[in-house]
């Protein structure tokens, strides 16, 4: 591929008209009604701890802090970012007798098979940098804490009590609600959940599932306590988070805001989150505010994906390693790379027309590139 000439400045952007951008003068307008009479802002985001953050994750995390800082400033409210570190992501997959079983990142860290620093330090470095730059404090919340929060368990009980109402929302393809326990002895979890039974009792949810080694077991989740552990798959967790954030309006006198990449807007919001919040009977005025940050797209227009890069290597969109790995990015460009992205995302969070669009990985490369030395360009044209 021929080398592109270095560009001293970001390319001129053109903005197609977008509905929501016409409704707002400032992105904080989307928070204004929910923040009225509230005492603080709580801005929540989440990421699976599946390795070193890539540039898409970096952009999302910096955007979260930029949204929080802007809203704190405009609305004049104390603000906290809550980062949900999803260590329940699968880290190991084992096939036994034709069934697939998994263990989570957290389990493998506990047993010493994964190094916690490998999974967490990249995110911690990013969060510390963003907090210092934005002057917004943050909390790092592991999944084990999240799944035991009283509103999260109240939502679990509500869903377990009305499984028939939720099947088509959380599992439109097969109707299986995946609230999975793990074997108390070896921590294997049945991936398909096809032999799982979920039984709502008085103040408890029982989860019965088979272990291929240790036989059937029962995990009992105490709804008002912290006993028990369960893995909520992505739609269940997303719904629980909506429920939690709406409960925080009273619990903390907070305007709760969920900030996520734009792939959580659109179809996900329309088919999963919104119908579920309505089914749970949460009035629209108590729904958390959702703010969606721009996607970083590969050269084919798809969402930049580290797992695709791992699978297809250099054939995947011809991207430099620095874009897939925060450590390489910082080694090659230092904190200047984060500064460049920060400058960009603060513009997104101020201007609706910049927030409600996507950006290509090449657009970001142009921002990060320094005229004097250009490792990204060198690597790509080598
Ligand atoms: Zn077992």
Image (spheres, rainbow, N blue to C red):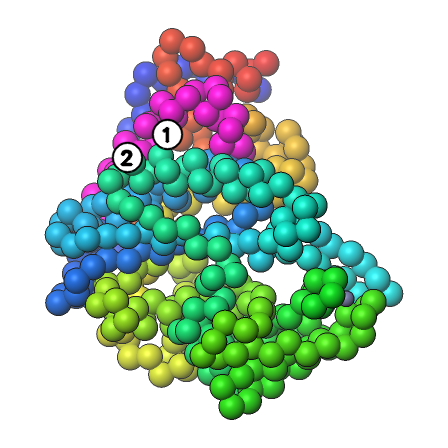
Q: Earlier in the sequence, mark 2 or mark 1?
A: 2
Residue 197 image position (x, y, % from top left): 66, 81
Q: Quadrant of the C terminus?
A: top right
Q: In the image, which disc is placed on residue 235?
A: none
Q: Badge 2 is on which residue? A: 133
User: In the depicted view, which residue is nearer to us: 299 or 289?
Assistant: 289
Relative to 330, say whether 251 is above or below.
below
Q: Main secondary structure of the magenta part?
A: helix
Determine the residue located farthest toward the right in the rendered image: 97
Circle 2 SS class: helix
Q: Quadrant of residue 135?
A: top left
Residue 85 image position (x, y, % from top left): 48, 52
Relative to 326, say whether 113 is above or below.
below
Is the Cβ of the residue at disc 2 closer than 8 Å to that at disc 1? yes
Residue 33 image position (x, y, % from top left): 17, 66
The residue at 48%/55% (across/down) is 142
Residue 88 image position (x, y, % from top left): 58, 57
Magenta residues, as a range?
323-352
Residue 319 seen by the camera: yes
User: In the depicted view, which residue is nearer to us: 11 or 158?
Assistant: 158
Would you say residue 347 sits in the magenta stretch? yes
Q: Which quadrant of the picture is home to ligand 1? A: bottom right
Circle 1 SS class: helix
Q: In the image, which disc is placed on residue 338?
A: 1
């Amino acid at each position: 591929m021929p080398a592109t000439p270095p560009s001293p400045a970001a390319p001129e952007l053109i903005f197609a008209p977008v509905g929501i951008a016409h409704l707002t003068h400032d992105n904080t307008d989307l928070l204004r009604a929910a923040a009225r009479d509230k005492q603080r802002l709580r801005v929540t985001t989440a990421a699976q701890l599946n390795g070193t953050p890539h540039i898409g994750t970096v952009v999302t995390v910096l955007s979260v802090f930029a949204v929080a800082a802007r809203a704190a400033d405009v609305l004049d409210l104390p603000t906290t970012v809550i980062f949900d570190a999803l260590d329940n992501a699968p880290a190991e997959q084992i096939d036994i007798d034709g069934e697939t079983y998994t263990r989570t990142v957290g389990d493998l860290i506990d047993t010493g098979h994964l190094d916690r620093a490998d999974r967490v330090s990249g995110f911690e470095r990013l969060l510390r940098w963003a907090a210092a730059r934005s002057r917004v404090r943050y909390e790092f919340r592991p999944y084990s804490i999240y799944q035991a929060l009283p509103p999260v368990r109240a939502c679990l009980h509500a869903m377990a009590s009305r499984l028939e109402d939720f099947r088509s929302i959380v599992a439109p393809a097969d109707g299986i609600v995946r609230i999975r326990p793990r074997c108390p002895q070896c921590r294997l979890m049945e991936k398909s959940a096809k032999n799982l039974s979920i039984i709502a009792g008085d103040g408890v949810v029982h989860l019965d599932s088979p272990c291929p080694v240790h036989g059937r077991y029962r995990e009992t989740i105490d709804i008002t306590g912290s006993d028990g552990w369960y893995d909520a798959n992505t739609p269940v967790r997303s719904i629980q988070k909506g429920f939690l954030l709406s409960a925080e309006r009273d619990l903390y006198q907070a305007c709760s805001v969920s900030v996520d990449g734009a792939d959580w807007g659109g179809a996900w919001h329309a088919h999963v989150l919104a119908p579920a919040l309505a089914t749970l009977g949460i009035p629209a005025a108590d729904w958390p505010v959702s703010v969606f940050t721009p996607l970083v797209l590969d050269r084919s227009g798809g969402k930049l994906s580290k797992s695709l890069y791992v699978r297809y290597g250099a054939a995947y969109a011809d991207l430099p390693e620095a874009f897939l790995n925060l450590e390489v990015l910082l080694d090659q460009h230092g904190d200047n790379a984060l500064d460049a992205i920060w400058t960009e995302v603060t513009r997104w969070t101020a201007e609706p027309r910049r927030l409600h669009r996507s950006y290509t990985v090449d657009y970001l490369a142009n921002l990060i590139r320094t005229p004097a030395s250009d490792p990204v360009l060198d690597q790509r044209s080598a």
